Image (cartoon, helix red, strand yellow):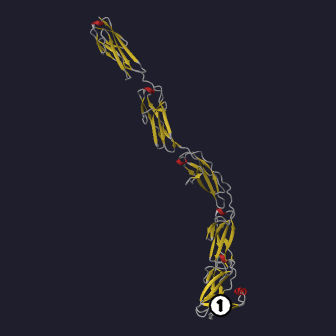
Amino acid sequence: MRLSRWAAGVLVATVIFGSSAAASAADASPTGVLSSRVASATLSPAPTPTIEGTAYSGLTLNAHPGIWGPGTVGLAYQWSRSGQPVPNATYRTYRLGPSDMGKRMAVTVTATKPGYLTEYRTSIPTAPVTIGTFTATLPLRVTGTLKLGETLTMHLPTWSLQPDQVDYGWRRDDGASIAFNTTTYVVTSADAGHTVTAVATAFKTGYASTKTVVESAIPPLSVLASAPIPTIVGAAQFGSTLNALSGIWGPQPVDLRFQWARDGLAIVGATTRTYVPGLQDIGTHLTVAVTGSKTYYATASRVSAPTAAIAPATLTLTRALTVTGDPVVGQSLSFTMPTWSQKLDNLVSGWRRDGVPIPGTRGGYAYTVRVEDVGHVISAFATASKIGYTSDTQSDVAPAVTYIPLVITRPMSVSTPSGIVSAGGFGDVHVGDILTLTLATFNVHDYQDLQSWRASTSSVSSTYTVSSHDVNHDVVVTQRAALGYPYNGQVFTVTLHVVP
């Protein structure tokens, strides 16, 4: 006899007759097994459980244990997959999952009650677990005109089973979605020559999803018969208006859009027929793209040839610079300041000698001619500058610089009682005559005078009184004027003979 197990407080003893081999066989088969229970109480009724539900992955199976007795009986559950217990599947319900696919499910109910033998009952296995299917009983339909700008409408199907969820939308060439969860779609130019597909997919737990599609071929767009390359007219310089000539597109009417670009990069906001180059455009090349669109026609774009490099603008002179005055040493030159139509940012002026600025003359309108200017070219200049414009320098050259012609403004002379004797002249005087010298003057102010009397008594005063020692001699008065370069010295003489 072998003690087999305790079950709900009841000891079950198995008595084996025969050899050990027979005993081993008895473990595998009830043949030759004599069982005696210490307790004689047996649960009744003890029905075989049943399983409610369809063996579809994702669905839930329910175990019906039946009615056990007598009275209240404790029931426990264990689900098995093709005879193998499913870990933690110890509830009355069981949700089928991917691991159960192709397997048969069963449930074992264990009944316990104090004073009664524990009983086990296993249900009949289910069919192999699979995925259910359902179909559309009324097909998906699409209505509408297959033309650009027209609206297509999707009419959803009905199914043999009520879906838990339906996803629907539109795709182009059965590729990426172009509209989701909407039953209408407006055909665009991007659809021309392609297939617009209406898609409706139904989902239901435990069932394979069901997708239905309707494909609608959209006719290709026509090609614009005339789409010329635009041209740009206008000066390629800062501040000058450029115009895009689009040419004639057809068949008319064609909607035209413009986009200007700087060195190939689109300029934000530059979307009209005209464009005025700004500071950022100087040194770059501009193009304009014209895009033509028309209902039922393919959109076309054409790009112009680039402009020349955008140059700075030119200042507009309204009055020229003019030098006035005598180009003579010691005299003043001046100039009239030029003017421009634009408001200037900066203006620099001054004087130059042989094209080199003369120190100290910047900003001056007047210039006093110097000795060092003789033989050189003296000019005035004014340079105007403004952002976005090429600097403009105006100049004017003075005539050749010379010295002031020497002019005797008052001749040298000597006054005698008998009259006045001019320079280079002769006369007679007598003892006791008072002679008065008048010096010559010149238009050149920077000079020195030396005067002298040569007689019996030399003198450098402006007067001389004839003495008896001068009788029968000449009194000579001389003026020497040191005028400097280039006049050199000037000498004037008056000779007077003293008579008895």
Instruction: Name above or below for residue 29 compared with residue 149.
Output: below
Q: Tell me what residue is drawn at x 64 percent, y 64 percent.
A: 188
Q: Is residue 134 visible?
A: no
Q: Position of residue 6 (x, y in %)?
A: 61, 88
Instruction: Name above or below for residue 449 compared with residue 69.
Output: above
Q: Secondary structure at mark 1?
A: strand
Instruction: Name above or below for residue 215 compared with residue 487.
Output: below
The part of the image, by quadrant, that contains residue 403 is top left
Viewer-nearest residue: 21 or 237: 21
The part of the image, by quadrant, that contains residue 54 is bottom right
Q: Identity of the amino acid at label 1?
A: Ala
Mark 1 neighbour density, 10 Å: few (under 14) some (14–19) many (20 or more): some
Q: Position of residue 173 (x, y in %)?
A: 68, 65
Q: Position of residue 195 (x, y in %)?
A: 68, 66
Q: Is residue 14 visible?
A: yes
Viewer-nearest residue: 288 or 359: 359
Viewer-nearest residue: 227 or 166: 166
Residue found farthest to the left: 432
Residue with the mark numbered 1:
13
Quadrant where the image shows the C terminus: top left
Q: Position of residue 199 (x, y in %)?
A: 66, 71
- Numbered disc total: 1
Instruction: Name above or below for residue 202 compared with residue 311.
Output: below
Viewer-nearest residue: 61 or 330: 61
Quadrant where the image shows the N terminus: bottom right
Residue found farthest to the front: 19
